[in-house]
Amino acid sequence: MNRDYPLERVRNFGIIAHIDAGKTTTTERVLFYTGMTHKIGEVHEGDTVTDWMEQERERGITITAAAVTCFWTPTYLRSAGGFGEASRLAQINADRNADNRGQEECKYRFNIIDTPGHIDFTVEVKRSLRVLDGAVVVFDGVAGVEPQSETNWRYADEAGVPRICFINKLDRMGASFEKSYASILERLNKHAVRMQIPIGLEENFSGVIDLLKLKAYAFTGEKGIDVIEKEIPADYLEEAKKYRHALVEKIVEQDDALMHQYLEGKEIPVDALKRTLRRAVIANKLFPVFTGSALKNKGVQLILDAVVDYLPSPVDMPPVKAVDVKTCGSVVRHASDEEPFSALVFKLQSDPFVGQLAFFRVYSGTVEAGTYVYNSTTGERERLSRIVRLQADKREEVKKVFAGEIAAAVGLKDARTSHTLCDEQNPITLEAIKFADPVISLRIEPKTKADQEKMGYALKRLADEDPTFKIKSDQETGETVIMGMGELQLEIMVDRMQREFSVAAAVGKPQVAYHETIQGEAEAEAKYIRQTGGRGQYGHVRIALKPMQPVDPTAKVKKNVKRFEHFEFIDSIKGGIIPQEYIPAVEKGVKEAMERGIVAGYPLVDVSCELTFGSYHEVDSSEIAFKIAGSMALQDAAKRARPTLLEPIMKVEVVTPEKFLGDVTGHLNSKRGEVQNVSDRGLNKVVDAKVPLAEMFGYITTLRSMTEGRASFAMEFDHYEPVPPNVAQTIIESRK
């Protein structure tokens, strides 16, 4: 079986945005215009392709990332008259019926992931960006850059993903392309460049002007299916020329030869400008900005053209870096079918028909259904019984997957998010995806004994799907505690547990996931000695504790140092005063004591523990004795190292009419909040603040009450910081 599309004509990209910016609405138009659907679904009608979960359709929000595949021929490559409805419909039908897609030289394959915009489900964005080659970032034309826009942009920066921007909803009251564009320059990146300007705004929005070609485009026919190229209206011509001049200057700065021609006064061909812009976009030096209204079916086709023109194919991206399992040295894998197979599992999804699906991105080589792959993370071989290509919740069986493609595997029992699948003869480990720690928790208990038996299985399946969803047992009460990134995420998980796994459960009130840490240094020595009638127990350790300092993740780690996300263990034992086989037991005892905490029973984090001295008994010493001694020493040292509580601080954005500004800021201050900035957004004021999560439960009800229901807010986790002593005392008392 051969590849049906050349790798150069494949685009793997995501659609990302703040909630309600119009991602799913845009995706629906993409699927319609590419011929993958016969009708456009609408979020408000609950019939969209990518929002397929019951919870998504009920709430009108995206909860889980959905993968879709479609095919696109750029509008400018179609035959004469190809912008018209008849030829476009013919193109769509050809797309639907063609089995020889690979023979059509102008057609491109799009693998798209529609991601959630709500902060509670940010894990979906992060792991999707890890495996994608590009992204279309959608912005609300009224609001511009919003909090989750900034977070998603930061994730894309971390992943090195090239982006194009789409300022959506220009048909709405209060829409402003210029203000939205200015917010991108100010809050995201100063190298964003206008590619289009709108013709009209709000109810008068009628089309766009392409600044490179200096042409206007209107979208007519059923659902805007006809793309009509025409001359720029006279009253927009001077403005368009001015912005084109600025755009060309930005582009030629990326190429010395073009800059030389430009300075000589020569006209630069459009094709040369597009090639140079493409290189700059792939290098994350420029970020093209387009505009339109997905709901009114204007501008989406030109976004698809831009994906072809400016976003990279897998071969345009740098080779992926990995670690050779055999040598522990660095290796790279290129996007080539000829190289050894390597892939990264980035998402798990429960499917009622086939069981668990493991989504994976192939970075190199090929893999066939029915063959065995090597999971280098677990060290086990697994059979890839079936491979499917996803169309949201629909599945299409495929026999073989090639480099640069995204698919889902059926039958992988032990594969989890961030696991590496590879060729057993050439084992490598790809860099794992890092996720944030949960900040909120709920106590949950089954309603019946039958539910109790099913709840453990259900929670495990859900935790496997979402790495930010954690489960633990309260050792004091025996209750089960679930933890996540926000109230909505936990609400959805409980709802899914009931609907998908038929588990009825009662839940408690949301609780803050506090942490503990130390602010000073301390040493402690502990001996665990027990004498019985037979063999006794003997373990003796001395440790030194200090706050863990931020470290460079690329820095080389010493052989005697084991470093985790919030913990560092240093083995400074010399001369065998503690045998090597007992040192892991000491580390385990220290880590278990950290989980129990010192101040109020919350996990202890950001601690550096150095094992400096100890002794052993040839007969009585054991791993359990050293484990207990390590635990005792940690508790003793931590109590003298100025322990303190840490609480999650949230970045809060409140949008309110100006007449309520004083009430809103005063109320935030009363909640131990710190107002960072107040800015304008149309007729409203935007308040940016940092507020402890503990103070934000039920905030929306209070906010609506004080603003006559006219204000809204969004929040996301920002950082942990020490709890004030008076508040800490209250928390400690409540835990006794």
Image (tube, rainbow, N blue to C red):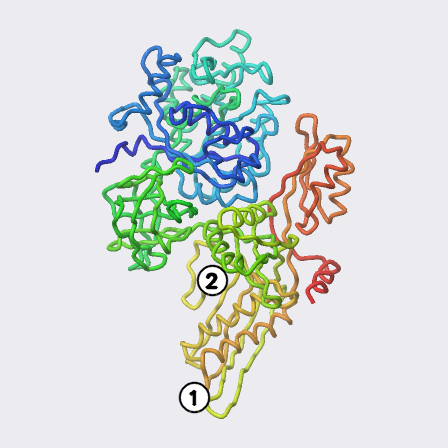
Considering every residue shown, the one lying at the far left of the view is 1
| In the depicted structure, whether residue 604 falls above or below residue 686 | below
Q: Nearer the viewer, mark 1 or mark 2?
A: 1
Residue visible at 46% across and 23% down?
A: 300
Residue 134 in percent (x, y) is at 42, 35
Considering every residue shown, the one lying at the far top of the view is 234
Q: Is residue 43 visible?
A: yes
Q: Earlier in the sequence, mark 1 or mark 2?
A: 2
**Badge 2: residue crowd in 10 Å (few <14, some 14–19, many ≥20):** some
Q: Is residue 283 visible?
A: no
Residue 344 circle label: none
Residue 397 in percent (x, y) is at 31, 39
**Badge 1: residue crowd in 10 Å (few <14, some 14–19, many ≥20):** few
Q: Secondary structure at mark 2?
A: strand
Q: Nearer the viewer, residue 501 or 579?
A: 501
Residue 733 in percent (x, y) is at 72, 65
**Res 135 quadrant in image:** top left
Q: Quadrant of the C terminus?
A: bottom right
| In the depicted structure, whether residue 686 falls above or below residue 442 | above
Q: Nearer the viewer, residue 7 or 195?
A: 7
Q: In this rendering, would 323 be left or right of 26?
A: left
Q: Which residue is mark 2?
A: 563
Q: Amino acid at mark 1?
A: Val
| In the depicted structure, whether residue 269 falls above or below residue 701 | above
Q: Nearer the viewer, residue 218 or 327?
A: 218
Labelled pair 1, 2 in contact (Cβ < 8 Å): no
Residue visible at 24% across and 55% down?
A: 425
Residue visible at 39% across and 48% down?
A: 355
Q: Which residue is mark 1?
A: 619
